C-alpha cells in the first residue's frame, strides 16, 4: 500500500519535512518513490515563503493510483487552495475526549490516595471528639482537693524518727 506521508529532515530541534510517496512498510525517513512537496514548520505562518509546498498535479495522480495520505498530509491537501486537489481528500478533525483522562493505574492510585486522606480526616475527627469528651468529663467531675504539701514532709519526718528508735 502506498502512503503520502512526511519524511523528516533538518537538524536536531530544527525540523524540516519532505512530503513523499512511500510504501507503507518503508521506514519513515528511508526509501521513498517520489518527493511531492515540503513542509517547514519553523517558518512563521505569515511568512513570505510558504510553509507548505505541494506538487498538486503529482499528488492528484498518486491519489488516483490509490495512495493514501496520512492525517497530517490529508490536512495539508484539504486546506490547499490548488484546484487540482480540490475535493480529492476530505480531512475531518479527530476528536479523542479520553486522551486527557489518566490511565487505569493512575486512577487506582488517585482513588487509593483519596481513601487514605478520607481515613486520615476521619481519624482526626474521632481524636478531636474524644479529646472534647475527655475535657467535658474533666470539667464535669468534682475537683478533688489534694492534701497540703506541708503535711507530707512532716509525716515523712515522723516516720523517719520512729524507724530510728
Image (tube, rainbow, N blue to C red):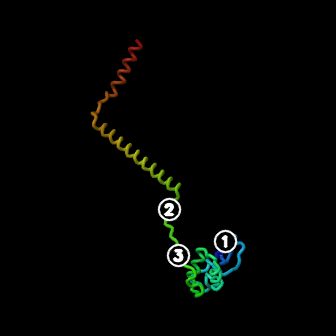
Q: Which residue is drawn at 37% across and 44% down?
A: 128
2 or 1: tag closer to the N-terminus: 1
Disc 2 packing (10 Å; few <14; some 14–19; many ≥20): few
- Quarter-of-image position of residue 53: bottom right
Find disc 3 in the rendering and name its residue. Answer: 92
Q: Which of 70 and 88 is in front in this view?
A: 88
Image coords of residue 8 (percent x, y): 67, 74
> Disc 2 and disc 1: Cα gap in Å?
31 Å
3 or 1: tag closer to the N-terminus: 1
> Disc 2 and disc 3: Cα gap in Å?
23 Å
Is there a contact, CB below 8 Å, between mark 2 and mark 1? no
Helix, strand or loop status at disc 3: loop
Side of 5 where 111 appears, left or right: left
Image coords of residue 125 (percent x, y): 37, 46
Q: Which of 132 and 50 is in front in this view?
A: 50
Q: Which residue is drawn at 61% across and 81% down?
A: 52
Helix, strand or loop status at disc 1: loop
Side of 87 where 158 appears, left or right: left
**Marker disc for residue 158:** none
Disc 3 packing (10 Å; few <14; some 14–19; many ≥20): few
142 lies above or below 88: above
Residue furthest to the top in view is 165
Find disc 2 in the rendering and name its residue. Answer: 101
Residue furthest to the front in view is 65
Amino acid at each position: 500500500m502506498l502512503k503520502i506521508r512526511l519524511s523528516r529532515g533538518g537538524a536536531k530541534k530544527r525540523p524540516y519535512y519532505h512530503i513523499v510517496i512511500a510504501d507503507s512498510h518503508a521506514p519513515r525517513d528511508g526509501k521513498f518513490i517520489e518527493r511531492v512537496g515540503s513542509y517547514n514548520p519553523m517558518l512563521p505562518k505569515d511568512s513570505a515563503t510558504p510553509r507548505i509546498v505541494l506538487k498538486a498535479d503529482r499528488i492528484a495522480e498518486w491519489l488516483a493510483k490509490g495512495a493514501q495520505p496520512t492525517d497530517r498530509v490529508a490536512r495539508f491537501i484539504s486546506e490547499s487552495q490548488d484546484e487540482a486537489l480540490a475535493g480529492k481528500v476530505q480531512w475531518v478533525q479527530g476528536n479523542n475526549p479520553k486522551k486527557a483522562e489518566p490511565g487505569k493505574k493512575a486512577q487506582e492510585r488517585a482513588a487509593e490516595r483519596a481513601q487514605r486522606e478520607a481515613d486520615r480526616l476521619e481519624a482526626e475527627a474521632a481524636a478531636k471528639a474524644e479529646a472534647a469528651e475527655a475535657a467535658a468529663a474533666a470539667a464535669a467531675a468534682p475537683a478533688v482537693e489534694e492534701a497540703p504539701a506541708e503535711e507530707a514532709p512532716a509525716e515523712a519526718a515522723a516516720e523517719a524518727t520512729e524507724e530510728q528508735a
